[in-house]
């Protein structure tokens, strides 16, 4: 990713107040775009379109909009500011007879319109809630889109927005079990309906298995943080850190010396944690795979806050051992989630790995087993113990090779 | 998002087209848009959507209509 070539040309015009630049980002996590702009020392106001409310197929896109809100150009020249200044900035454009009003939807009226129980009414209500609703409105947004989808299952936009809303809720304090998997399921459905949507495709890919040539979605973040810090600034904190799937080159993190060469608890002797201390959530991207295809498994381990369970960071890290079924292959058997720098902590710990479905696998439900080993402490100043948490990751094997390439 | 190769491609196509647009003559669609039409409100001569989007900084709704009275370059992209 790089700064647009016209940025330098427009810089002085912006400073002179002759033109404004507004960024609209299509990220699921728009704060990452803000970090990029901080890195490049660009101060554009930035709006977030995580749900593709603008209904765009692809990015990037640059438009020149006149003082009345009318689009004048859909591209900008590469040449110097003089061209832009002459052909756009210094032009005087006629005021249209009528201008669309600024968007300030009547939420009660939109809600009342849902009484008609049509897909468009529910989607319009969901769209408005996603922007104008309160901070805890993601459940309401999801509910509205679900009703729209029930009435029109063939609308890709509703499916994509529903998936993005589930992922928004997953990343919020209002998270519900299964939100991440539900997000993937609806994105997959959206792509099935319209496979030409580049933005939707990238949304799936960023959480999915590494492609033949791993995609550097957010590898730039490492450089950005180092450069920003070297300037004496504090890099903007991200709400959600990218996972391994979002890097072409995941961080070195743990050395090979910390990974066990053989199964660490083959005889199952470590005491089990059945959820009293740590819960686990699974998500598979894609959740349905054909024989021969690869899926990416996301596991999230969360200390039970109700019992004040917390990680003990003064000992070994959480280690996850993958036990795939016979003939299934995985990119690695052992994965380690690093400790936090403090002595104790309660942050969720994420583990990702990839599994390939055997060519001869029969269609139907399948599961990939594994277990985590970790040190967890109970309550404040409570007992610390070493526990094993067994995990079964469900996925569906389809009957044939998918026609829609991910 | 890929590097500035994609930026160079469509901005290079537009140099002559920008002059044609200023003279009022129709300009050809860029290569990338010929099979992927832009929705209403994103084409020359159309009113840009006034739909509000949340500010990435604080989540408050902001509409492009708030920038009326000033010429605006709208840069739509993704940080991947």
Image: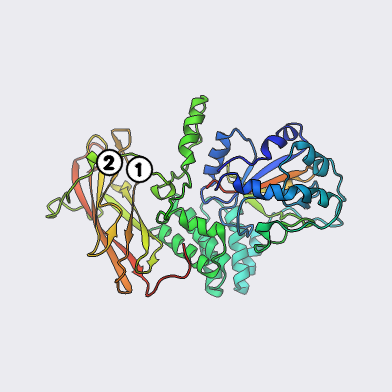
Chain at tag 2:
A
Question: What percent of the width, then of the height, locates residue A328?
Answer: 27, 63
Question: What percent of the width, then of the height, locates residue A107?
Answer: 64, 59
Q: Is residue B48 left or right of residue A135?
A: right
- In this rendered view, identify the residue nearer to me: A391 or B9: B9
Q: How many marks?
A: 2
- In this rendered view, identify the residue nearer to me: A323 or A44: A323
SS for callout 2 = strand
Q: Is residue A300 left or right of residue A264?
A: right
Chain at tag 1:
A
Q: Is residue A89 left or right of residue A288?
A: right
- Neighbour tally class for label 2: few under 14, some 14-19, many 20 plus, Cα within 10 Å: many
- In this rendered view, identify the residue nearer to me: A226 or A128: A226
Is residue B79 depicted above or below A58 in this figure?
above
Do the residues bearing badges 1 and 2 touch, measured as CB atoms within 8 Å? yes
> What residue would you read off at disc 1?
A347
> What residue would you read off at disc 2?
A311
Is residue A65 depicted above or below A289 in this figure?
above
- From this viewpoint, is residue A133 visible? yes
Question: What percent of the width, then of the height, locates residue A47?
Answer: 62, 46
């Amino acid at each position: 990713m790089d700064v647009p070539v016209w940025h330098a040309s427009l810089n002085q015009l912006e400073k002179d107040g002759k033109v404004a630049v507004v960024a609209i980002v299509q990220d699921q996590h728009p704060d990452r775009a803000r970090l990029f702009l901080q890195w490049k020392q660009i101060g554009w106001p930035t709006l977030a379109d995580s749900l593709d409310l603008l209904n765009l197929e692809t990015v990037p896109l640059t438009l020149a909009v006149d003082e009345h809100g009318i689009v004048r150009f859909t591209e900008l020249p590469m040449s110097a500011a003089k061209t832009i200044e002459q052909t756009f900035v210094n032009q005087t454009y006629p005021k249209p007879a009528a201008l669309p009003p600024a968007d300030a939807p009547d939420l009660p009226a939109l809600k009342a319109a849902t009484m008609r129980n049509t897909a468009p009414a529910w989607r319009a209500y969901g769209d408005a809630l996603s922007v104008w609703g309160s901070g805890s409105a993601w459940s309401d947004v999801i509910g509205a889109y679900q009703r729209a989808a029930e009435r029109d299952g063939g609308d890709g936009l509703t499916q994509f927005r529903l998936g993005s809303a589930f992922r928004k809720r997953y990343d919020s304090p209002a998270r519900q079990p299964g939100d991440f998997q539900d997000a993937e399921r609806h994105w997959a459905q959206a792509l099935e309906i319209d496979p030409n949507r580049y933005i939707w495709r990238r949304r799936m890919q960023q959480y999915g298995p590494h492609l033949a040539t791993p995609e550097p979605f957010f590898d730039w973040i490492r450089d950005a943080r180092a450069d920003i810090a070297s300037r004496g600034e504090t890099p903007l904190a991200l709400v959600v850190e990218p996972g391994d799937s979002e890097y072409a080159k995941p961080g070195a993190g743990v050395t090979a010396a910390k990974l066990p060469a053989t199964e660490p608890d083959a005889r199952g002797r470590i005491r089990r944690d059945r959820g009293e201390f740590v819960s686990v959530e699974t998500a598979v991207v894609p959740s349905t795979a054909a024989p021969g295809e690869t899926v990416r498994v996301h596991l999230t381990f969360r200390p039970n806050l109700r019992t004040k369970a917390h990680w003990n960071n003064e000992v070994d890290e959480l280690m996850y051992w993958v036990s795939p079924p016979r003939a299934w292959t995985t990119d690695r058997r052992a994965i380690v989630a690093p400790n936090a720098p403090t002595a104790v902590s309660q942050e969720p710990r994420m583990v990702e790995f990839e599994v390939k479905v055997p060519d001869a696998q029969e269609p139907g439900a399948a599961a990939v087993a594994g277990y985590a080993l970790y040190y967890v402490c109970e309550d404040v100043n409570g007992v610390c113990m070493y526990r094993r948490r067994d995990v079964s990751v469900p996925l569906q094997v389809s009957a044939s090779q998918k026609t829609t390439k991910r | 998002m890929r590097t500035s190769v994609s930026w160079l491609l469509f901005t290079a196509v537009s140099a002559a087209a920008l002059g044609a647009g200023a003279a009022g003559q129709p300009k050809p669609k860029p290569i990338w848009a010929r099979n992927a039409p832009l929705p209403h409100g994103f084409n020359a001569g159309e009113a840009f959507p006034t739909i509000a989007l949340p500010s990435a900084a604080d989540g408050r709704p902001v509409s492009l209509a708030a920038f009326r009275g000033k010429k605006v370059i709208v840069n739509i992209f993704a940080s991947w």
